[in-house]
Image: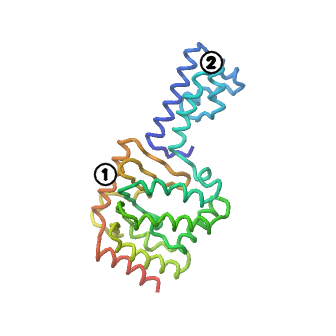
Amino acid sequence: MPSYQSSSVEAARKNVAARLREVRRDSGLKGHELAAFCGWNKSKVSRIENAITPPSDADIRAWCAGCGADDQAPDIIAASRTADSMYLEWKRLQRTGLRQLQESRVPLYEQTKLHRGYASHVMPGLFQTPAYASALLEAVGRFHRTPKDTAEAVAARMSRADVLRKPGHRFTFLLEESVLRYQLGDAECMAGQLGHLLSIMSLPAVSLGVIPFAARDRGMWTLETFDVFDDQRVHVELLTAQVTLTAPGEVAMYVRAFGDLRGLAVYGAEARARVADALAALG
């Protein structure tokens, strides 16, 4: 796993490691004896017990078998999978293509009453035009070497955006001004995207703030893109993975960061003027 881990992911992995360590100790086996039974390098037991190497399902079964605790394997495997699901590498999420990834998020979006999002790199998916989404997903697919299903993925993303017009939902989003200036696709694509953003800003369920380049006395630094779903769940998007946070303390921290960032943003006519300026700059 890459070096970035949320504390909840790390805590879950350490819990699995601690349970395996207790199973070994209860069996009376030393680390090197268990490694020999499993046919592993003797350092592997130490790496697993110190949460350095996440164990596979097969590792856990072998570990429990060696300790005479086969009955504990299912529970520990379930705990390990829960920890693993908090941090999902894009290569795993995108293994069957980008369309399925887009569709998999629809239930969460439709169940969420208050969706808050912060974007520091690209336009939020809910606000994208087909041309912008196509340019972005083409780049994503090329970089991550996913199956080529951009057209299907774009259609799924457009369908997902229908939630913006369904009753019972509110959307509060913040964009760094740089998002308005980073050009994906050609000038025509970007102009269409900015024009679409202006129309999105008029929707009654949407509140959109723009954080200016020159926000004075900026007390909150630029963060990674994240989404908060009803104060219950946070998705953080990294280059290598999506991190899902559900621990109340961590969710609260992102809610607080969103509040601080929100205080830096401009809204209404001033936000629309920032979008219009970016549109005019395209010539």
| Picture quadrant of residue 99 | bottom right
Q: Is residue 267 above or below residue 2?
A: below
Label 1 residue SS: helix
- Is residue 274 visible in the rendered image? The answer is yes
Q: Residue farthest to the right? A: 39
> What residue appears at the point 37 percent right and 58 percent down from the top-left corner?
116
Q: Is residue 43 above or below residue 204?
A: above
| Residue highlighted by disc 2 | 67
Observer-nearest of 21 and 150: 150
Which color mode does the image show? rainbow
> What residue appears at the point 55 percent right and 25 percent down from the top-left corner?
20
Crowd rating for badge 2 (residues with CA inside 10 Å; few <14, some 14–19, many 20+): some
Residue 94 % position (x, y): 61, 55
> What residue appears at the point 29 percent right and 64 percent down from the top-left corner?
264
| Residue highlighted by disc 1 | 256
| Picture quadrant of residue 214 | bottom left
Check the picture and name the quadrant holding the N terminus.
Answer: top right
As shown in the figure, which amino acid type bears the numbered disc 1?
Answer: Arg
Q: Residue farthest to the front? A: 167
